[in-house]
Amino acid sequence: MIKKYRPNIIFFFGVVIVAMIMAAFYDLQIDKALNNPENIFAIWFRNTGEMPGRLICPLAGTVLFYTYKNKLQQIAGLIIAMGGSAYFGYYFSKYFFVEHEMIFGLVFGIGFGLVCLTVGKYIHIPDDKKDTLRQIAIIGVIVMFVQITAIEGMKYLWGRVRFRDLIAADSFDEFTPWYIINGINGNKSFPSGHTAGAAMSYLMMFMPYLSDKWKKNSQLCFWIPCIYTSIVAYTRLVMGAHYMSDVTIGGTVSFIIVLLAIKIYDKRLSKN
């Protein structure tokens, strides 16, 4: 499958190289030009941009619950689905519930998990697709945890001050270019977590493994996530939360992890 996406991969990394070269010289100037934290469009994607990453566990857990036959494995799927839904509920309540956000988030999360499990009960999965779908679900969960670990580790290591914090301090003296590693200091601008979460949508690139119909539309499985992630990345600049280099690397980290997962899965298929 990597061969099918090769032109897209070349395009992606070409854009990344150009963006990072530009960011080395114009990161601060770009944020100054785009900064508009009251922009409704940007606020909406601040609230919803990470949803692809947050939805992985509820959906993957539901798939595992209905594709496994072993009771213990089904219970594991149930735990992933409900635990992931609670996590999603917390994220949702953080932005949409003003008061009692923890309570509403927990209720919403549990409700969302039950809806996923209920809907999943009525979706027919052909027997010859269950194994593939189950493997993709497991890959999705692993990819999500690897991505979160990588992004959070880099955030702490780089210790880069956010643009909005520079604005609040009314001074740009603490600005550092992306190639400077500041060490752990409490600042977490580089790379962008929102963009990395949005880029989890690149897991759509696994869809062609499921059917010939998706194989014919494999380009959509790249371009839909690419466009969505780019929109989220742009809005993070408008919000003053990140620099262009932050969002570029955030999306790139997730994309690379997905590519590695596809490569490993391809190798496993070739052995079988």
Image (cartoon, rainbow, N blue to C red):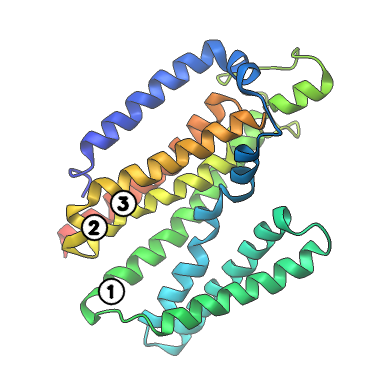
Amino acid type, label 2: Pro
Q: Does the residue at mark 2 contact the one at mark 3 (Cβ under 8 Å)?
A: yes
Mark 3 element type: helix
The residue singled out by tag 3 in the image is: 205
Q: Which residue is mark 1?
A: 131
**Secondary structure of the residue carrying numbered label 2:** helix
**Quarter the C terminus occupies:** bottom left
Compute the Cα span from label 3 to label 1.
Answer: 17 Å
Which badge, 3 or 1, comes first in the chain's sequence? 1
Q: Earlier in the sequence, mark 1 or mark 2?
A: 1
Left/right placement of residue 217 relative to residue 134 reads left
Q: Position of residue 169 (x, y in %)?
A: 83, 21
User: Residue 175, located in which quarter of the rendered image?
Assistant: top right
Give the number of the mark in front: 1 or 2.
Answer: 2
Locate residue 187 relative to residue 270 in the image: left or right: right
Looking at the image, which residue sits at the far front? 40
Q: Nearer the viewer, residue 61 or 218?
A: 218
Please rate how many residues cluster around mark 3, counting C-alpha atoms within 10 Å: few if below 14, some from 14 to 19, many from 20: many
- Label 1 environment density (alpha carbons within 10 Å; few <14, some 14–19, many ≥20): some
